[in-house]
Image: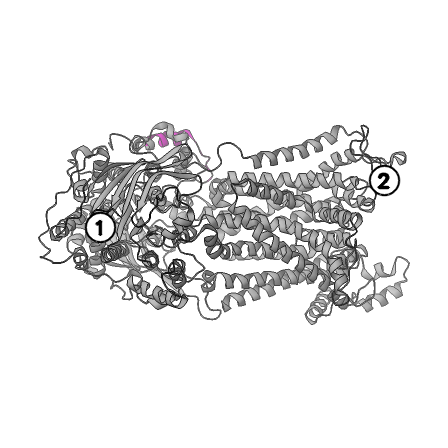
Amino acid sequence: MSEHLLEVKDLRVSAGERTLVDGFNLELGTGERVGLIGESGSGKSMTATALMGLLPEGVSAAGSIRLAGTDHDLVGARDSRMQRIRGNRMAMVFQEPLSALNPLMRVGPQVAEVMLKHRTVPNRRAAAAKAVEMLASVRLPDPAEAARAFPHQLSGGQRQRAMLAMALANDPALLLCDEPTAALDVTVQRQVLDLILESVSRRSTGLLFITHDLSVVASICDRVLVMNNGRVVEEGTTEQVLTRPAHAYTRGLLAASDLEATDSGGRLFTVASAAAYVPPKIVSPPRRGTTTGTTTATRAARPTLPDASARTDHPAPATPAEQPDRGRGAGAVEPLISVRDLVRTYRRGRTSLFGAPAEVQALRGISFEVAAGQRFGVVGESGSGKSTLLRILAGLDQPTSGSVKVAGNEVAGARENELRQLRRELQIVFQDPMGSLDPRMRVRDIITEPLLLPGESARTARHAERAAEMLRAVDLPPEALDRFPHQFSGGQRQRISIARALIGEPRILVADEPVSALDVSVRAQVLNLLSDLVDRYNLTLVFVSHDLGVVRHLCDNVVVMNQGLIVESGPTEQIYEDPQHGYTRTLVASSMSLRSEMAGRAMDSREEVTSQGEGQ
Amino acid sequence: MGIRLLINAARFAVTFMVATVAVFIFMRAVPGDPAQIALGVNATPELLAETRAEFGTDRPLPVQYFDWTLGLFRGDFGTSYVTRRDITPLILDRVQVSLILVGLAMAAALLIAVPLGTLMAVNHRRISGILLSGLSQAGVAVPGFLAAILLVVVFAVGLGWFPANGWTPPGEDFGDFLRRVFLPVLALASVQGAILTRYARSAVLEIMSEDYLRTARAKGLGRTEALVKHGLRNAAIPVLTVTGVQLAALIIGAVVIERVFVIPGLGSLLLDAVGNRDLLTVQSVVMVLVAITLTINLLVDVLYTVLDPRIRKKA
Amino acid sequence: MSDPTPAAFTGAAPVPAGRPGRGKPSPTLLIGAALVAVVVAAALLSFFWTPYDPVRASPGDRLLGSSAEHLMGTDRYGRDVFSGILYGARITLLVGLISVGIALLIGTPLGILAGMRGGAAEEISMRAADILMAFPALLVAIMFGAVFGAGTTTAMVAIGIGSIPGFARVARSGTLQVMSTEYVLSARASSQSALRIARRHVLPNIAGVLVVQCSVTFALAVLAEAALSFLGLGTPPPVPSWGRMLQESQQFLGTFPALAVWPGAAIALAVLGFNLLGDGLRDRFDPKLNGEAGR
C-alpha cells in the first residue's frame, strides 16, 4: 500500500498547561484494523476525539493529521471543512449507546440525517429507505420497526447496532470506535464485535479501535498501539505486542489481563510481578478444522448467537440433579447458605387503570446451597436476577416466596432485629468504587460503620484500633484513615470497601462485581487481595459477576443465572469445559479471554494469504 | 398516555377538593360574624338573625361547605356579604383581564428568554455571554413593581408615549387596549423574561454537554445546526416546567402590576375584597386561582407527553 | 501478605476526582457574599446607630435631595431616607430568616421522609406539596392578611409556608439520589437504622443543595416581603420597610423620582446578592445533586 489512509504525525493534545497526548504517530492503511489500548486516563479517547476534530472547549491539538482524499491537514482545519469529512469520510461509534442517541428522535430519522446532511441520497424518502436498509445490514431483527422506534425502546446491543448503521451509512473510509462494547453484556459484546469486524472487512474500511480490553484487541486488530500517560509506549503487530511485549508497561498490562496465568503461589500476576509472566504462546488449537476463507468466515464459524433482547425462549430450570455439590469436604455439615424455591416478583407502575399492575419476575424459583468455606460464583448478565438474589441474601429485600437461610437465619418474613444477626454474618462489597463510599465521610467513619450499634456514638477507641488493623489488612497506609474517598484511586477505594465489609468479622463475604469498574492492572491486585483475605479469615465467598474469566479464576463452584433462573450449576471447571445448557454454551463461547482470542488469531493469520501487518 | 392523563386528572380533582376544604376551614377560622360585619356594631339582634338567615351563615358549617362547593361546580359563587352583589359576573370579568395580561406577558417573556438564553449558553465563555448573564441576574433581582414604576416614569410621565394607567377591554377599542396594555406587559415580561432566560441558559448548557450532541457533530452537523436540530427540543422540557410554575405564580403575582397601572384584574379584586373583609369573595377568588394553577399544571403535563416519548410508555 | 507494593504506589494514579469547586471561590460567589454582607452590616448597624430616628417626622425638612446631612434625602414627612434604608435592612433580613427557617424546618423533613420511605408516605407528602404549590407565597400572604390582619409576622409566616414545597422537592430529589447509592445500601446491610442513615448519610449529602435552596428562597422572600409591603399587607407604618418606602414614593414619581431609587436599589441589590450567593454555592457543591434546586 503506497498511500496511507490516515497519517498522524506528532499529535499533541493539551488542555492549557496540561499535556494529555504527546507525540502520537500513526499510519493506517486502507482496510487496516488498528487497536489503541490504554487504561483510564491514558489519553486514548482524547486521541480519537482529536482525530474527529471534536475536542471539548479549552482542549487543543497540534501536529498533523492527514486523511487520504482530503487535501488539507485536519489539525487546525476550519469547522466547515471538518463538517464535510465527519460522518462522511470518517465516522465514529461511541461507548454509551443510550446517551449517544437523541432520546426524542426516532432511530430511522437519526440514521437518515447523516445521509441527508452529506447529500449521499437524493431526497428524504430515499434517505428513509436507505436508513431501513442500513438497519437491516447491522442485523436488527425488524429494521422497519427499529427505524420507527425511539432509542429507549431498543436494547443496549440494538442501540449500538443502530449507532454502527449511522456511522457506516455514508461508507466512510475510516471508522473510529471508542470502547463500543464496554457497556454491553458479554453475549451482546461478542455479537457487536463480530458485526463491526464483518462490516469493516466487507467495505475495506480502516478501523481505529479504542479499548482497555486486550482480548478484544486480540480478536479484531492487525496492529496495536499501547498508550500510557498520554504516550504510545509500544507499537507493533498484535502477535508481536501480545506475545513478545517489549515495554514493561505492556508486559504488566498483559500479565494482569491474563486470568488464566498464575504465579508460583497460584495468584494472578500484577504489574509488580509481571517480570515472571510468560505471555501466551501461539499454539493453533487442534479442535478447529481447516476452515477456508477470510477472517469473517472464521468468525462466522462460531456458534451463532441470538440477540439477547430478541431471546424469547425461556431457559429451563436446573434439575435437582444439577444442584451444586457440597464443595470441599463439606460432608454432612449443614450448608452455610441455603436457598429453596426462591421467587421474587416486583410490581411495576400501573399501565392500566383497571387491570392488575404488571409484574416483573426477577427470580423465578431458584435453589442452591453454599457450604462453609466454599468459593461460590454467581454468573449472569444484566437482568439475570443476580442483583436481586444478592439483596435478598443480605436481608435488604424480602422473597415473594421460598426460603433463604443464611448462617441459620431465615430471611423470609424476618423482622429488622432478626436480620441484624444475619447481617453480622454476611457483608457485601459493592461494584462501584466511587458510589459505595460516602463522599462526605472520612475513611475512619466509613470503615467502622458496621461496628456501630444502635445508640452508640461513633469513634470509640475500640473502633479506631479495629479500623487501623483492617487498613493494614488491605494494604493501605494508616494515614488513609483521615482522608476522604475522593483522594483515592478506584482500586484503593475498593480496598476500603473490603475493609469495611470485613471489620465486623463476618463469616460470609458477598462480592458484587467488585472489579468490573476497575482498570486491568488494578483488577488483578484486588482479586489477589480478596483471595488472600478469604483464606486468612476463613471466609465463605459468594462472588457475583458477569465475567466468566474472573469467576473461573476465583471460584470452585458456580451457578449460571439467566432471566431469573439458575440454568446450570456445578464445579467451575466442569461448567467451563463442558457446558450443558444452551445459554451457558453461548456465554462460554461469547466470553473472551486473552488466550482464546490469541489462539483464534493464530488460526486466522495462517489462513490469511496476504500479510496486513505493516510493522513500523 | 391516556392512563397518565387520567391519573393526573384524578389528582387534579383530589387536590382541588382538598383545597376547597382547606380554604373553607381557614376562612371560617376568622373571628367575626359576616352578618355582624355587614351590619356594623349597632345592629339589632333581630336584624342580625334575619341577615344570618339571608346569608345562610346560621346553618351548620358542613352544610354551608357543601352549599358553597356545589355552587363552585355550577359556576355560582354566591352573593357578597359586603357589597350584596353577585360575585360570579365580577370574577368572570376580572379573570379575562388577568389571563390576557399574564398570557401576553408570558408569551413575550418566552420570546425574549429562549433565544437570549440559548445565546448566553452558546457564548458562556465569551464576554458577550458573561455580560448577558450578568444582565439577566440583575433583571431577576428587580421587583416587578419597581420595573413598572421605572417604566411609568420614563415612558408615561417622561416621554408621554403611553398612558400611565387604566384598562380598555380589547373588544371595545383595540387600539386603546394595545396602548394601555403595552407598559404593564413589558413590566411583567422583563422580569419574567430574566427569570426564564436563566433557566433556558442552564437547560441549553446542560444539553450542550450531552453525548447525542457530540454524535450529531460526528455526523457532520455544525455546532448551531446540531444544537437547533437535536438540542432545543430536549432543552424545552425543563424550560416548560419552569414556565408552568411561573405562569401559575404570575396570575396572582401580577397583582402588584395591576396596582401600579390601576388594572381591574383578579388580584385587584382579591385585594379589594381583603380590604373590605369580604370573605366570600376572597374565598371564591382564591378557588378560581387554585383552579387556574391546577389547570396549568395539567396542561404542562400533557405537553410533556407530547414532547418526550419516554414518558408516554410510563404510567 | 498481598502485593509487595500497595496499589497506592503502582500504575498511574488517576487524578483525584476532586469535588468541583474546592479551589478558589468564583467571582459570582464573592460578589454575592459581599452584597449579602453589606445588607447584614446595614441591619446590624441600625441597632446601634442611624443618622436620624427613622420614624420621627420632621415637617420642616420634607422632600430634601441628597446632601451632607441627609445622604439619601428625606421623604414627604421629612424622615431621613438613609436611616430608613438601614432600618429596613433589619426587617428584610428578619422576614427572610424566619420565612426561610419555617420552610427549611418543615419542608426538609417532609422531603427526606418522602425520599426515604417511598410508597404511601411519599405519595401523601408530595400531594401535600402539590396542594401547597397551588398557593404561591403571595396568595397565602393575602389570605393570611385577610384573616389575621396585615403585619410583619403574618408576612413572614405566609412566605415561609409558601416556600415549603420548594424545600420539600429539593430535599426529596436529593434524598432519592442518596438512597440509591451503594453506600446507603452498605449502611443498611450493616443494620443501621433509618434515623441514623438520615443523619449520617442523607443530611450531610443534601446539605449543599439545601444551602443553595436557602439562598434562593431568601431572595424570593425579600421580593415577596417588598411586594407585600407595597400592597399594604406587610410591615405596618411607621416602621420603615423597603417595599413600603417604594410604595410611598409612587405619588412623587413625576416630581421627585429619587425617592423611588433608593429603596428600589436596596431591594434589587439584596435580591441580587442572595441569588448570586446561591448560584456560586451551587457551582461549588456536587453538580449531580442540584437537579431541582431553585423551584
Could you say where residue A500 lies in the image, as x and y percent from the top left? 36, 38
Where are the magenta residues, as a range? Answer: A454-469
Tell me residue C182's x, y (percent).
Answer: 40, 45
- Judging from the image, what secondary structure is the residue with disc 1 in? helix
The quadrant holding residue A444 is top left
**For the residue carrying disc 1, how many other residues have a C-alpha within 10 Å: few (<14), some (14-19), or many (20+)?**
many
Q: Is residue B34 above or below residue A174?
A: below
Residue A150's place in the image compared with C249, above or below, is below
Question: Which residue carries the number 1 mark?
Answer: A220
Q: Nearer the viewer, residue A407 or C152?
A: C152
Kind of residue at badge 2: Arg
Q: Quadrant of the C terminus of chain A?
A: top left
Residue B124 as seen in the image, left or right of residue C222: left
Check disc 2 and report its element: helix, strand or loop. Answer: loop
Q: Chain of mark 2?
A: C
The chain letter for the residue carrying disc 1 is: A
The residue identified by callout 2 is C76
Image check: A324 left or right of A23? left
